Image (cartoon, rainbow, N blue to C red):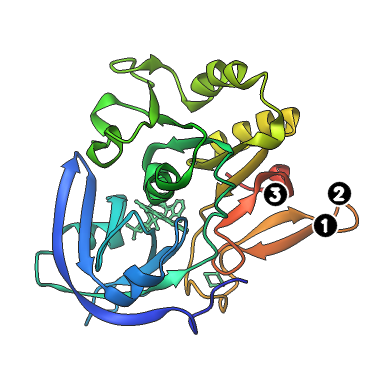
Amino acid sequence: MPLTPRNAHAALIPVLSNREIVPGIFRMAFEAPRLAAGAKPGQFVMLSIPPTHDPLLPRPFAVFNVDGQRVEILYRRVGKGTGLLSGMRTGDLLRVLGPLGNGFALPDPSVTSIVLAGGIGFASVHFLLLKLLKRQTAPTTLLYGVRSHEEIIPMESLDKKGLLIRVATEDGQQGVKGTVIDLLSTTLPRTENLPTATIESFACGPLAMLRAVAGRMKGLGMRAQFSMESRMACGYGVCQGCVIPFKGDDDPKQIKYRKVCTEGPVFAAEEICWDAIQE
Ligand SMILES: Cc1cc2nc3c(=O)[nH]c(=O)nc-3n(C[C@H](O)[C@H](O)[C@H](O)COP(=O)(O)OP(=O)(O)OC[C@H]3O[C@@H](n4cnc5c(N)ncnc54)[C@H](O)[C@@H]3O)c2cc1C
Ligand code: FES
């Protein structure tokens, strides 16, 4: 069942820390016991900075990590909202609404998981990876692609937990030279003798990456859950601003629209009408 603000909590919360961990990417922590207790991997929060209403609309961010009563987000500074966020200091107040959205459906522990992250899409799968590593008996692999090696997020929380991490950089300075799709091309043959029902993929990243991954997964008949992003105004189903196209129930050629904020952000890749999504 999609979560609505009735399940979410709105609160003014002091920032605990806000550090630039690699150039232009920040990790922010705040203490939010109710949010921490209720948040699931793949869910998100809407953040704004009181008392100003500038920018007018709150901004969505994935729950990156939950540690006791602390909740963390990982964000890239791209515009006005994230610019203001990056200037926040310990003790400054943040308006937080969440948890919002459906989150990833966790697979059976015996399922082999392939998690794909492109750029800041890593923020949406990090909490999922921690959960998978706790409960899966089958291997979990992370395929992580970034443009430059300078953008690689340190992974101390994942390193020692038996996760197979494969990195691709477009500048070729670390890992494989290329993208997540190149990593996928060399990873899939290793799963060839596993029945497709025993493998599941999870992904978040730029649209072009998700489109390409969806094509591969469809060809193999492999299950894929994607965390989708769209511009959001409210975050809880009121403004209709976040819709993306899906295949019709009876006729796959027909398009129906679904809200990323309340029906997503996680969707089965094969349901999305990729041809109708604008870049
Ligand atoms: C469910 C969800 C979870 C998200 N999680 C994260 C996260 O964990 N970390 C993170 O860094 N970002 C995340 N984002 C994207 C983040 O919300 C935007 O980067 C942020 O709203 C930009 O705000 P701004 O005011 O700084 O930029 P603006 O001034 O509004 O825009 C700056 C530039 O960013 C582009 N942009 C803004 N919002 C989006 C968006 N939603 N999708 C694609 N392009 C966008 C604009 O087109 C413009 O080019 C998430 C988005 C969604 C929908
Ligand atoms: S963001 Fe308003 S309906 Fe989804």
Residue that label 3 marks: 272
Extreme-left residue of the structure:
90
Q: Amino acid at mark 1?
A: Gly
Mark 2 is surrounded, within 10 Å at the Cα level, by few (under 14), some (14 to 19) or many (20 or more) other residues, namely: few
Residue that label 1 marks: 248
Q: Earlier in the sequence, mark 3 or mark 2?
A: 2
Horizontally, is 175 left or right of 271 in the view?
Answer: left
Residue 8, image x, y percentages: 44, 78
Residue at (47%, 71%) from the top-left corner?
233
Mark 3 is surrounded, within 10 Å at the Cα level, by few (under 14), some (14 to 19) or many (20 or more) other residues, namely: many
The answer to whether mark 3 and mark 2 are in CB contact below 8 A is: no
Mark 3 CB near ligand 1 (8 Å cut): no
Give the CA distance from mark 2 to mark 1: 7 Å
The answer to whether mark 2 and mark 1 are in CB contact below 8 A is: yes
Please state which of the two labelled residues, at mark 3 or mark 2, is closer to the viewer: 3
Q: Earlier in the sequence, mark 1 or mark 3?
A: 1
Image region (quadrant) for ligand 1: bottom left
Q: Quadrant of the N terminus?
A: bottom right
Extreme-right residue of the structure:
250
